Image (spheres, rainbow, N blue to C red):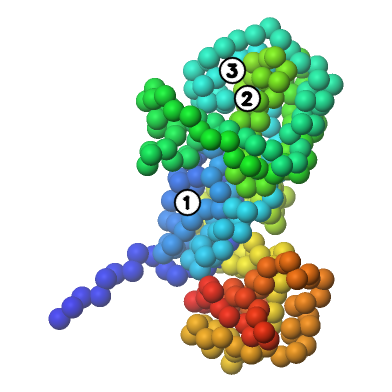
């Protein structure tokens, strides 16, 4: 007689707008949430460095199927560059590599920042999670290995100085796309200004629809460990990261077919609603909803909806 494998956790689904504290890794944050919610499956929507705090979107259950959209979302950061000291990791984690008496004026920093707005090519920090020949770059860097990383195309939507508390520090606000490294910007900015510098403080204040004002701290969640209803009240629907994607309302009958992976025919008024404000160059991806429940991601083609990712909720 075969034994059924015991399920590790419950099928909890939703997004959590978590405010991660300093000195906690993203992996540790995921483990804490997994334990608190007794969730079967948990992931995050974009690594946040241990020395940074701020928004770390956490996906539970079927929401993990939408992690890509959190990764692709615009992100906002507020960070402080400490001038005069460069480190191997471009933050306070690693050893000092150079020092300088140069302290750039606010006007000089503002002028240099302009070159970093738009589509730029950025070489990631060697202390990053990028894989090199199957190894993490930060492991190679800590091991003293010599290697080079290739420049990547990234989008920077805005960058400005928002504070200069003293000559040693500049506070900067950045809005970026995916794959952007704040530490690399600090490195390159210092080089442009003939100075040394590193990130002394970093906070991610927004990831797409998730911002600091609506976030919940790890400590607050841990205080609700014995209050199941209070804990689950912080969960957002799995399509919380899909606010910019066209939504289609489907009938309960069609929702059942979609959950079976079947293509459905769309009513004319549904297609017209989907077409509003769209051009032929836009992708054909849409989210099918039955009421407030996400059913499937799929493509609209020739009056039909073809599911490509189905949600088992």
Q: Rounded to the nearest whole Å, what is the CA distance between mark 1 and mark 2?
A: 29 Å
Image vertical order of residue 213 relative to residue 203, above or below: below
* Distance Cα–Cα, label 3 vs label 2: 8 Å
From the image, which quarter does the N terminus lie in? bottom left
* 13 vs 51: above or below: below
Residue at the disc numbered 2? 187
- Residue 86 — which label? 3
Q: Residue at x 50, y 45 (%)?
A: 26
Evaluate if marks 3 and 2 touch, with contact meaning CB atoms under 8 Å apart.
yes
> Which residue is located at x 82 percent, y 71 percent?
277
Q: Which structural element holds mark 2?
A: helix
Depicted 105 relative to depicted 219: above or below: above
Q: Which numbered circle lies on residue 30?
A: 1
Q: Nearer the viewer, mark 3 or mark 1?
A: 3
Q: Nearer the viewer, mark 3 or mark 2?
A: 2
The residue most toward the left is 1
Q: What percent of the width, then of the height, locates residue 65?
A: 52, 65
Is residue 199 or residue 195 the one in the foreground? 195
Q: Residue at x 67, y 84 (%)?
A: 302
- How crowded pointer 3 is (Cα within 10 Å; few <14, some 14-19, many 20+) is rated as many
Mark 1 or 2: the one toward you: 2
| Mark 1, secondary structure of its residue | helix
């Amino acid at each position: 007689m075969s034994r059924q494998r015991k399920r590790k956790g419950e099928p909890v689904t939703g997004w959590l707008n978590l405010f991660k504290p300093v000195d906690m890794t993203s992996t540790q944050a995921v483990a804490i949430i997994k334990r608190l919610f007794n969730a079967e499956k948990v992931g995050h929507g974009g690594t946040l460095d241990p020395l940074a705090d701020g928004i770390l979107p956490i996906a539970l259950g079927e929401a993990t199927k939408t992690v890509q959209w959190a990764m692709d979302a615009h992100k906002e950061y507020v960070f402080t560059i400490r001038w005069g000291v460069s480190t191997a990791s471009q933050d306070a984690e690693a050893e000092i590599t150079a020092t300088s008496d140069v302290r750039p004026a606010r006007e000089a920093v503002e002028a240099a920042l302009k070159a970093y707005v738009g589509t730029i090519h950025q070489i990631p920090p060697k202390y990053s999670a990028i894989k090199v020949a199957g190894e993490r770059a930060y492991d190679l860097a800590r091991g003293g290995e010599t290697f080079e990383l290739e420049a990547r195309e990234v989008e920077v939507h805005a960058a400005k100085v928002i504070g200069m508390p003293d000559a040693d520090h500049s506070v900067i606000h950045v809005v970026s796309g995916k794959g952007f490294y704040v530490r690399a910007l600090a490195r390159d900015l210092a080089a442009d200004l003939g100075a040394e510098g590193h990130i002394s403080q970093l906070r991610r204040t927004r990831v797409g629809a998730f911002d600091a004002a609506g976030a919940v701290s790890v400590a607050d969640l841990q205080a609700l460990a014995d209050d199941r209803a209070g804990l689950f009240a912080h969960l957002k629907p799995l399509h919380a990261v899909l606010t910019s994607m066209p939504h289609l309302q489907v009938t309960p009958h069609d929702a059942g077919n979609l959950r079976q992976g079947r293509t459905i025919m769309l009513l004319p008024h549904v297609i017209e609603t989907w077409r509003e404000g769209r051009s032929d160059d836009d992708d054909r991806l849409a989210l099918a909803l039955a009421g407030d429940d996400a059913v499937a991601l799929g493509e609209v083609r020739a009056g039909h909806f073809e599911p490509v990712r189905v949600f088992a909720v």
